[in-house]
Amino acid sequence: MSLNPNETRPTELRRDFLTALCVGVGGLSAVIVAVPVVGFLLGPLLRDTERKWRAVGPLDKFKTGDTVEVRFEDASPLPWAGVTAETGAWLRRKNQNDFVAFSVNCSHLGCPVRWEPTAKLFMCPCHGGVYYSDGSVAGGPPPRGLTQYPVRVRNGNVEILTSPIPIT
C-alpha cells in the first residue's frame, strides 16, 4: 500500500459517489415537487375565465317585483368539486322580460348575503354589510356594490351568464 498523495482512496471514491447521488436525488425531488406548485400558482394567470349561460328556471316561475334566490352550477366546476360547484344569485323580475341578478356573495369578504323583503335590503351577517335593492352599498365595510350577472330569456327559460365567485 503506497502513501502517494495523488492516489485516490476507495473511501474518497465512495464519498464522492454518495455525495453526487444525494445531490442528484435531492435535485430530482425538488423538480418533482416544484412543477405542480408552479403550475398551480401560474395556471390561473394563463387560463381564460370561462363564462357559461345557465338556466335557472322557466319564465313563468318568477313573479314581477319578487327577489328570489336561484341556484346554478359554477362556470368552471372542477371534477372533484361536488356540492361546492353549485352557486347562486338573487334574481328579480322587473317586468315581462327584464330581470336583474346579483351575486349572493358580499363584495367585502365573500360571505353570503340574504334578501330582507320587508326592508328591501341585502344584508351580510358576517361584518354588517348592507346593500340597497339595486345592489349599491348602503352601509358597512363592503368596498363596492354587489356584482351583477347578465340575464337573458331564451326559449321560455331565464338564464344567467355565470362567472367565478366575484370577490376582490
Image (cartoon, rainbow, N blue to C red):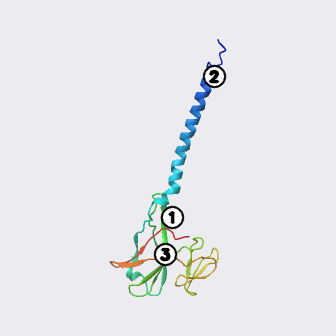
As measured in the structure, the alpha-carbon distance from the residue carrying label 3 to the one carrying label 1 is 15 Å
Q: Amino acid at mark 2?
A: Thr
At mark 3, the secondary structure is strand
Q: Position of residue 123 (x, y in %)?
A: 59, 79
Name the residue beneath numbered marker 3.
89
Crowding at dot 3, Cα within 10 Å, few <14 / some 14-19 / many 20+, comes out as: many
Residue closest to the eye, 90 or 8: 8
Name the residue beneath numbered marker 1.
84
Q: Decide which of tag 1 and tag 2 comes sooner along the chain.
A: 2
Q: Nearer the viewer, mark 1 or mark 2?
A: 2
Who's the residue at 39% across and 87% down the image? Answer: 96
Q: In the displayed structure, would residue 12 be above or below residue 75? A: above
At mark 2, the secondary structure is helix
Q: Position of residue 29 (x, y in %)?
A: 55, 41
User: In the rendered structure, are the residues bearing label 2 and label 3 in contact, judged by CB atoms less than 8 Å apart?
Assistant: no
Examine the image and state in which quarter residue 128 appears.
Answer: bottom right
Name the residue beneath numbered marker 2.
11
